[in-house]
């Protein structure tokens, strides 16, 4: 009996020792996991700090560059010498150019560095070929790669680019910023030229993507009512939200379609429909925008009255 009890105690002790050992291993594993998590957290924090430092450093460099570039006087004779050089100050703390060191840059040479090799004009939205670092206007290099028989190489140094030359282009943000500082008038000129281009294509019936005026014309923001001129007649009437380029011909299409659906007029012809706005007969090609400018829309209701002309006997 005593032996059995002794064996049981020994077994219990062994189990307790094993359980303790397992618990110790679990604790160690938890410690290792906590340690790994701390390392990961620390690495992520260092990466975040490093990224923030880089961004701050980049922003600081850009500010410094802008500060320096703002000191380049392209059109002032007061800060240029007899050799047509631009005076670029190295110390911005003094207003007197004679009191500190400066760098003299030939104006012509500087401006030549800012010209596209293809169009010979100043860069507009500069893009650089990654393989050789030659830079061009975006439109110039895109046209070249789209039309040239030697599109697989740089147009300046003939470096081989490959079968997908567009993929080698990188937008030169720094150079673009520099040009905007040196030539602030370009932004307004570009804006005017864009509007002219959009209008040309819009008037031709082929609007370009990004045309804000076309987007406004396509936006349904004008509520109109279509009603028969003779209110006692059993004819179609309804209200619609239409865009500004919606015309009278489209109103007539609605009248024909709805009249058929409601069984009012089966063979209604567009030529027999007359449409009036404020007692004025309106032509087919008049849009909501034109009618608004000519007759003025009301804030609450814009009612277009229609009537059916009598078909002439043959």
Image: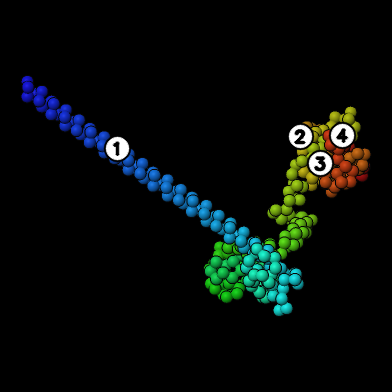
Q: Dot 3: what SS?
A: helix
Instruction: Give the labeled residue for mark 3.
Output: 251
Q: Residues within 10 Å of mark 4 (few under 14, many from 20)?
A: many
In this rendering, position of residue 65 left or right of residue 278: left
Q: Residues within 10 Å of mark 2 (few under 14, many from 20)?
A: few
Q: Residue at x 69, y 54 (%)?
A: 209
Q: Dot 4: what SS?
A: strand
Q: What's the distance in space between the residues labelled 1 and 2, CA to CA?
A: 79 Å
Q: Residue at x 20, y 34 (%)?
A: 18
Q: Residue at x 55, y 71 (%)?
A: 132
Q: Residues within 10 Å of mark 1 (few under 14, many from 20)?
A: few
Q: Is residue 176 visible?
A: no
Mark 4 or mark 1: name the one nearer the start of the chain.
1
Label number found at residue 228 = 4
Q: Quadrant of residue 80?
A: bottom right
Q: Dot 2: what SS?
A: helix
Q: Quadrant of residue 207?
A: bottom right
Mark 3 or mark 4: name the one nearer the start of the chain.
4
Rendered location of residue 130, percent (x, y)? 55, 66
Q: Is residue 196 visible?
A: yes
Nearest the eye: 258 or 26 = 26
Q: How is the image coloured?
A: rainbow
Label number found at residue 261 = 2
Q: What's the distance in space between the residues labelled 3 and 4, CA to CA?
A: 12 Å
In this rendering, position of residue 62 left or right of residue 73: left
């Amino acid at each position: 009996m005593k032996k059995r009890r002794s064996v049981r105690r020994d077994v219990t002790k062994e189990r307790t020792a094993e359980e303790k050992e397992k618990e110790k291993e679990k604790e160690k594993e938890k410690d290792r996991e906590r340690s790994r998590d701390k390392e990961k957290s620390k690495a992520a924090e260092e990466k975040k700090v490093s990224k923030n430092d880089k961004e701050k450093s980049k922003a600081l460099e850009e500010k410094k560059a802008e500060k320096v570039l703002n000191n380049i006087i392209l059109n002032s004779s007061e800060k240029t010498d007899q050799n047509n050089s631009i005076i670029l100050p190295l110390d911005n703390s003094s207003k007197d150019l004679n009191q500190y060191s400066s760098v003299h840059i030939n104006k012509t040479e500087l401006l030549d560095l800012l010209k596209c090799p293809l169009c010979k004009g100043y860069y507009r939205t500069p893009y650089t070929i990654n393989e050789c670092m030659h830079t061009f206007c975006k439109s110039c290099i895109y046209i070249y790669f789209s039309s040239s028989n030697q599109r697989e190489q740089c147009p300046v140094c003939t470096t081989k680019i490959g079968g997908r030359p567009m993929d080698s282009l990188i937008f030169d943000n720094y150079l673009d910023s520099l040009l905007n500082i040196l030539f602030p008038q370009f932004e307004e000129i570009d804006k005017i030229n864009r509007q002219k281009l959009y209008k040309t294509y819009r008037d031709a019936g082929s609007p370009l993507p990004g045309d804000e005026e076309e987007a406004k014309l396509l936006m349904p923001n004008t509520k109109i009512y279509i009603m028969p001129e003779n209110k006692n007649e059993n004819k179609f009437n309804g209200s619609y939200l239409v865009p500004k380029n919606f015309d009278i011909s489209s109103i007539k299409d609605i009248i024909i379609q709805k009249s058929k659906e409601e069984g009012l007029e089966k063979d209604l012809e567009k030529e027999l429909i007359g449409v009036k706005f404020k007692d004025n007969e309106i032509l087919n090609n008049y849009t909501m925008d034109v009618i608004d400018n000519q007759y003025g829309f009301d804030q609450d209701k814009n009612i277009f009255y229609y009537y059916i002309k009598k078909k002439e006997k043959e």
